[in-house]
Image (tube, helix red, strand yellow):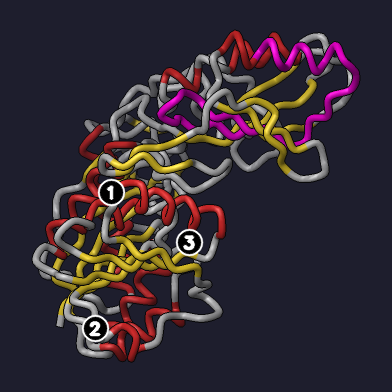
Amino acid sequence: MTPPEEILRVAAKGDGVTASGRHVPLAAPGDRVLADGTLELGPHHAVPPCRHFGRCGGCQLQHLDEEALAGFVRDRVVNAAEGQGLAPERVAPVHLSPPNTRRRAVLRAVNGGGRPLIGFNEQGSHRVVDMRECHVLRPELFALVEPLRRMLGPRRDRYAAEITLALTDQGVDCAVKGLALEGLAQTEAMLDFCREQGLARLTLDQGYGPETFWEPDPATVTLSGVAVDYPAGAFLQATADGEAALVAAAREWLAGSDRVADLFAGLGTFAFALAGSTRVAAAEAARDAHLACRTAAGRAQLPVEALHRDLFRNPLRAEELRGFGGVVLDPPRAGAREQVVQLAASGVARIVYVSCNPSSWARDGRVLADAGYRLAELRPVGQFRWSTHVELASLFVR
């Protein structure tokens, strides 16, 4: 008879793992796998708060308590570093976003046999879980789900729409892709929906690209006290508290720098946090985000120079970077290999690397380490609560 095995850790995709390498779905550290394959729950196994957990692809880790969840986030980041031979001099405590704080999300909507189904996809499937509760979304976002059902309810056509929700200063920004309005009745129903729900904006993509359907006032997001125009679909940190944790790290680590480069700057999340006594050059490839950052900096009269530049195809060269006291970069999930090569050759004293992908971050970090940089501090961040998606802020110095 196979002896019981204890779950020692949680793997990257959320399965519990034993010493023998056995992967067990929905298992927490301290659980025991018995001879018949059943799970004896341990001290770190929590009762999932949501009825949809196990089917809904929005969460993978609701069965972990706070200690185990923080441990998972920390291990993902630290293991990625160690896998590339990076030894952080300090690993800060994990920051976990609380429940019901996600301020942006992408939902799916389909006609499920004459009635609309709205929610996240099932785990590993294109089937939609018809969301009746959610413990990660901000209440303002979840409150739109039932009104969306009512608005879509009378339709009999087949559709598979993508609904992107984001919380702006004026309310919820809603972008719908893959839903066509046919006739005056459907158009009026959509207008009534926008008016009754007090939407900040509704953008529709009916197959010809996104078009603004409703926007009573220009939508903005406030970044470090600066109101920035919010282009539909622009990147926004998933939670306000997660953004604050990442911004605090950049401010602390780059304090005293008279000139900083913000690479992959987006709307200016870090640029506006650092600007003041510090002059910031904010480089971004997406034209709408670049223009929003430049316009907001001008209105606020802050020393932010917005640069429209594709850092994948045309990274800032080492010689361009040598005049900066520090650099902050927050690239997409693929990392920033070519830009990091230039950073490594520049000799910039302090590099703050923020990442949503520990694997690509670690590969880039190896390039910096080989150039003489040391990893002074690592801060794991779990913005996507109960998800296997983790983020981090790191400081490289030389």
Question: Residue at the location (36% across, 53% down)?
Answer: 298
Q: Nearer the viewer, mark 2 or mark 1?
A: 2
Residue type, numbered disc 2: Gly
Secondary structure category for the residue under label 2: loop
**Which of marks 1 and 3 precedes in the sequence?**
3
Question: Residue at the location (49% across, 26% down)?
Answer: 53
Q: Is residue 178 magenta?
A: yes
Mark 1 lies on residue: 381
343 to 232, vertically: above or below: below
Secondary structure category for the residue under label 3: loop
Q: Residues within 10 Å of mark 2 (few under 14, many from 20)?
A: some
Residue type, numbered disc 3: Arg
Which label is found at residue 333? 3
Q: Nearer the viewer, residue 100 or 331?
A: 331
Q: Nearer the viewer, residue 276 or 50?
A: 276
Question: Residue at the location (64% across, 32% down)?
Answer: 163
Measuring from the top left, give residue 271's x and y in whole percent. Answer: 30, 57
Measuring from the top left, give residue 273's x and y in whole percent. Answer: 24, 51
Magenta residues, as a range? 164-193
Residue 265 relative to residue 353: left or right: right
**Which of marks 1 and 2 precedes in the sequence?**
2
283 to 116, vertically: above or below: below
6 to 361, vertically: above or below: above
Question: Residue at the location (25% across, 53% down)?
Answer: 380
Q: Is residue 376 magenta?
A: no
Q: Disc 3 to disc 1, how far (Cα)?
A: 15 Å
Secondary structure category for the residue under label 1: strand
Which label is found at residue 323? 2
Q: Disc 3 to disc 2, how far (Cα)?
A: 28 Å
Q: Residues within 10 Å of mark 3 (few under 14, many from 20)?
A: few
